[in-house]
Each structure stands twice: as structure tokens, then as C-alpha cells.
Amino acid sequence: MELPDDHWLRLVNLTFADMRMPLFSFLSGFVFVSLARTDKEPEELLLSKARRLLVPMLCVGGLFWLARDLSGHVQQPVLSIAIMPFAHFWFLQATFLIMSVFVVLTWLSGRRDVYVAALLMVLGAGAWITRAVPPENVFSVIQALYLMPFFMAGYLTRCFGMPKIDRSWTAFVLAVLIGVGALLATDAVSVQPFWRRCLTVACGLIFCFTLLSLQPKSVTLARLGKMSYAIFLFHVFFTAAAQAAWLVLWPDVSDPVMWISGIAVGVIGPILVYHLITSNALISFGLLGIKIPSQRPVGATKSA
């Protein structure tokens, strides 16, 4: 949904810009521990993540490219989406790149994963803050450096546990973070680029640690979390469709109505898609990266 730069909805969205993607990457690193600390060989581990991340990136990304092309949008060549950032699918490229570097270095270091995670956390933050990045953003390498400290912070938090923080402080910290985000979003304060990037890393890490310290529990959110990958992949199709439908049915619809309905459809639609496609092994492999189950030999029976 395209809004003017000074629209309040856009400013609300920008307020949380330094917290949203860092949280997703932090959680990715948090859950990656259970997979990284197994007896799997590096190549087996990376192949499983390539299936889960890169196959949907190509298939769903290709469908999204086609949908935009049919709608008349000018965009990058279709084959480039395999190696260059495209829409929100850059997150999958960056995450796979982070995992690949981590897995290889952990293997080379003799499985000293904690040391590798700490090193990559510092190096990633330092490279991004100082803009020591490659000239070309191939495979979203610049975004990978941006997300590296958050992913590794999540990994280390899972390894060592989250230190207990007095809950009376968490609300205050979250309020300060939102206030800082609002000041930056509205350009109420002017910050030099270097310090702006420092703030980005600091705010992202503090937000992740603070939110995790709250240990929020919700059955609804837990169930929704199982569908989070499908929501991430497919939400753009439904939000775009909702916006197009509003413009046809009610051209003068208010921005808040379009925005809220777009969010609702962008969540509900992918959940329905998830339930539809998971009944087909081949489609769920292409669109969600779910492993195709091995065929049971004819006449084989389950063991007691």
C-alpha cells in the first residue's frame, strides 16, 4: 500500500522499522540452535535449509514476479530473483547466507558454535555500521550483514538463556524504544548516518531482549506462529488483491479501512493457502519447502 511520506499510517510503520526485521532474525537464530546442534553434516544441514528457504524463494518469488508483471509493473529481470534481492524475499537469501557462513565456520572451528556466533555478531554489526559492505548486493549480502547481529544474538540467547529482567522495567524500555522510533520516523531529530546505523543495531537488540524477557504466552499466537512462514511468503498476494478490490468496489475508501482490511486478509489468506497446499506433497515442497515424504514400500506395515 503506497502512502504519502507524511501519512500517519506510514509513520507508524516506520516507527517500528528498527524492531520488526531484527525480531524475525533474532527468532530465526533462536530456533536454529536445535538444528545446528545435531549430528548432521554441514552439507546435509545446508541442503535442508536450501530446501526450506531457497525453493520457496524461487517458486513463490517467481509467482509474485509474474503477478506484478501481468499488472504492468516495471521490475527486474525474472532470472535475477535467484541471485539479487526481490521484494520481501531478500530475507530468505540473507538468512540462508547467514546460516551458511555460520555452519561452515562452526565446522572449520571444530564445532565451537558459541565462539563463532559471538564473532559473527560483532563482525556483522561492525561491517554494517561502518558500511564495510560489498559494492554489489548479490544474494542480499548487505542485508545479511545487517541481520547478522540479531540472528547471532538469538542463537546465543538460546545457548545461555535469557537473563531475568524486572518486568517493571520492560514497559519503560519498550516505551522509550517506540518513542525513539517515532522521533526518527518523523525526522524530529537529525542523526548522522553512522550514529543512525548504531541506533538501528542498538534498538533492534534491546527490543528483542526486552520482548523475550516478557515471555509472553498466547495459545492463539502459538497457533498463528505455525503458519508464520506461509504468512510471510503469501501475504503480499492478498494485501495487493484486497487493495485492488477496494479501489474497484469503493474508490473513496479511507486509508485506515484499506490498511486494516489488508492486514486481516494478508493473514487469513495465507493460512487458507497453507491448509490447501499441504495436502499435496509436490506443491507444498515447491511453495513451502516442506520435505517430500519417502514412499513406503508396497506391502510394508507399520511397526508395533
Image (cartoon, rainbow, N blue to C red):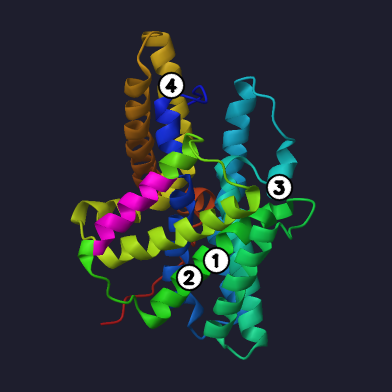
Q: What amino acid type is highlighted by mark number 4?
A: Gln
Q: Is residue 178 magenta?
A: yes
The residue singled out by tag 1 in the image is: 149
Q: Secondary structure at mark 4?
A: helix
Q: Residues within 10 Å of mark 1 (few under 14, many from 20)?
A: many
The residue singled out by tag 3 in the image is: 84
The reply, left or right, for residue 134 in relation to residue 70 is right
Q: What amino acid type is highlighted by mark number 3?
A: Met
Q: Nearer the viewer, residue 14 or 279?
A: 14
Q: Quadrant of residue 123?
A: bottom right
Q: What amino acid type is highlighted by mark number 1?
A: Pro
Q: Which mark is residue 243?
A: 4
Residue 103 sits above or below residue 292 on the image? below
Q: Nearer the viewer, mark 4 or mark 1?
A: 1
Distance, label 4 to label 1, CA atoms, is 35 Å
Q: What amino acid type is highlighted by mark number 2?
A: Ala
